[in-house]
Image: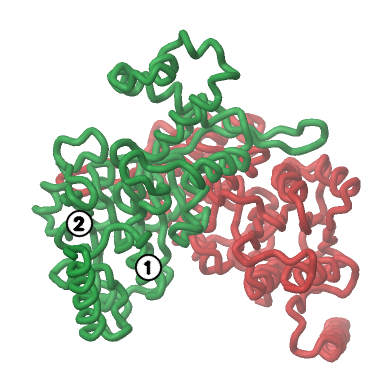
Chain colours: A green, B red
Amino acid sequence: MKRAIGGILLFAIATFAYAAYGQSDPLPSWNDGPHKKAILNFVADVTDESSADFVAPPQRIATFDNDGTLWAEQPIYVEFQFSIDRVKALAPDHPDWKTTEPFKWLLAGDMHAFLAGGESSIVPVVAATHSGMTPEEFRTIARGWLATAKHPTKKRLYTQLVYQPMLELLTYLRANGFKTFIVSGGGVQFMRAFTEQSYGVPPEQVIGTEGKLIFEIRDGKPMMLKLPDVQFVNDKTGKPIGIEHKIGRRPIAAFGNSDGDLQMLQWTCAGSGKRFCLYVHHDDAVREWAYDRHSLIGRLDLGLDEANIKGWTVVSMKDDWKSIFPPE
Amino acid sequence: MKRAIGGILLFAIATFAYAAYGQSDPLPSWNDGPHKKAILNFVADVTDESSADFVAPPQRIATFDNDGTLWAEQPIYVEFQFSIDRVKALAPDHPDWKTTEPFKWLLAGDMHAFLAGGESSIVPVVAATHSGMTPEEFRTIARGWLATAKHPTKKRLYTQLVYQPMLELLTYLRANGFKTFIVSGGGVQFMRAFTEQSYGVPPEQVIGTEGKLIFEIRDGKPMMLKLPDVQFVNDKTGKPIGIEHKIGRRPIAAFGNSDGDLQMLQWTCAGSGKRFCLYVHHDDAVREWAYDRHSLIGRLDLGLDEANIKGWTVVSMKDDWKSIFPPE
């Protein structure tokens, strides 16, 4: 009964929202308030040819972090869960892993020991699971995993744990002549396995951490192989650097959720003319997770201070978002 | 008198071509023949939804080399001439250059000694002229130089020494849903100084050799600086690798003119489905330059053999192109 009343109430709210905005609300999953208004005003200003803030379409570059900004990142990054699952799947071909750190911890389910190793645990696992195949083969493996693996507590596919309000924002910006890029610390080839389908962002607009590649002719056939070494880390200062290398102009809008995005937001909002910087603040312990200054995953500490000083938009998932994930 | 007859003849040919194609000839500077036909047929096939060779628009990726493919590269690469001119311009601030190799050779006009040094001459000159400023400042310097510097024998601005038939090809492909990229061994920031204006290719679709960048906060302001070190060489095997890193899918068409483009063409045409690989052959000693197997700049040797074996399109600048450069 309680559920039925909740359902009716939700319907009444939705109807009210529909009536207030008509069919034209481009951000229906965002609650009215200063943050939604800030987005709408920014887009109105830079697309109005009569405005002093007008920005020509080629310059309308918007960059989005991925983990924690476009999809969930708790309790651990999705790509990291993928790596753990791959170690388990590949273990029969690597009998030595049973006695080799850090693999043996994963295989024995000792996550505490594994995580205590920090980078010295993570690097060999990512190297072992992300190399030795072509980029295309890797993307196929990642796609296969994403098609079936489910989140441990939400019990949904990871691609269903994307943020509905951010999907609307991506669509809204593109409808207004923006070119949307993903700029993430995650592996670029892992993201390309799903970003086009999930976010409408084509592979050439995905910037991420890159592993080394080798090109050679084998039996007369050109081959490209992923090597275990890292070529470029697209995090923190690597984000504006990656943007400069690959886009070659400064974004006018940037969206993130953690200290890893701080330099991208600093770089974006220090440009001349109208700029927009936004942090997604994870403060919804009921519908998602609540974490910021002390989280190991997606820590938002320095960024929160700077956002307050600079007047960047800090979105409350709890208060600003009507829904978090797309309907099941 | 001879010139007048030539003019009348040219006009007659142009009129004939116009009549034969109507206004719709998308490649008016290309002579009729098997090579022009190969381009038109390829585009017709991959854009025809009822064809087995149909390629959906997001997969219509076409990559172009720059030097010698889209603009002239003789007697030396344009960017290299820029570097030499910059050494001369900066010399008053570097009195030590008068006595330091390789700078002293350039300042004394001893190109023979300079070029004999090969890489050990070129690397310090590029480092000295391409670093110590922001990427934006560098592009402004390059733009300033391109606005006034003239080719030593053609006596035209370098941006007027782009190939008219290739400009038409870029436009034609884009009109047919292709996304056109430049994939060059040249410096990415140098190219971005002119590629949008000259070729209609935005900076985010320009892939080139990259210098290292550093990002830091100076006096509270985010700064990006070009360092003298090379981060990625986008030549030979670096071309397909650069494509995989930055585009993330294999092109269906690739255009080059030298052995430096061979791996890009191999990679492109080894993909499944309809593919198109084209070499521009510099065989017009009268209107441009004639060079291939033995040239130090833009050598086409292994590539010419492989093009013949694989049946790639080899365009004769002399026979296939009505005009080389845009009208003055």
Q: Which residue was labeled with disc 1?
A: A60
Amino acid at dot 1? Arg
Instruction: Specify whether A98 is left or right of A267.
Output: right
Name above or below for residue A256 compared with residue B305. Answer: below
Would you say residue B133 is visible in this rendering? Answer: no
- Quadrant of the frame with the N terminus of chain A: bottom left
Q: Is residue B167 above or below residue A227?
A: below
Q: Please name the residue shown 48% across and 33% down the image.
A: A231
Residue pointed to by mark 2:
A317
Rounded to the nearest whole Å, what is the CA distance between mark 1 and mark 2? 26 Å
Taking A262 as reference, is B311 left or right? right
Residue located farthest toward the front when viewing the structure as drawn: A1
Q: Quadrant of residue A83?
A: top left
Which is closer to the viewer, label 1 or label 2? 2
Parent chain of label 1: A
Crowding at mark 2 (Cα within 10 Å: few <14, some 14-19, many 20+): many
* Residue drawn at the location 45% of the way across and 39% of the way down: A187
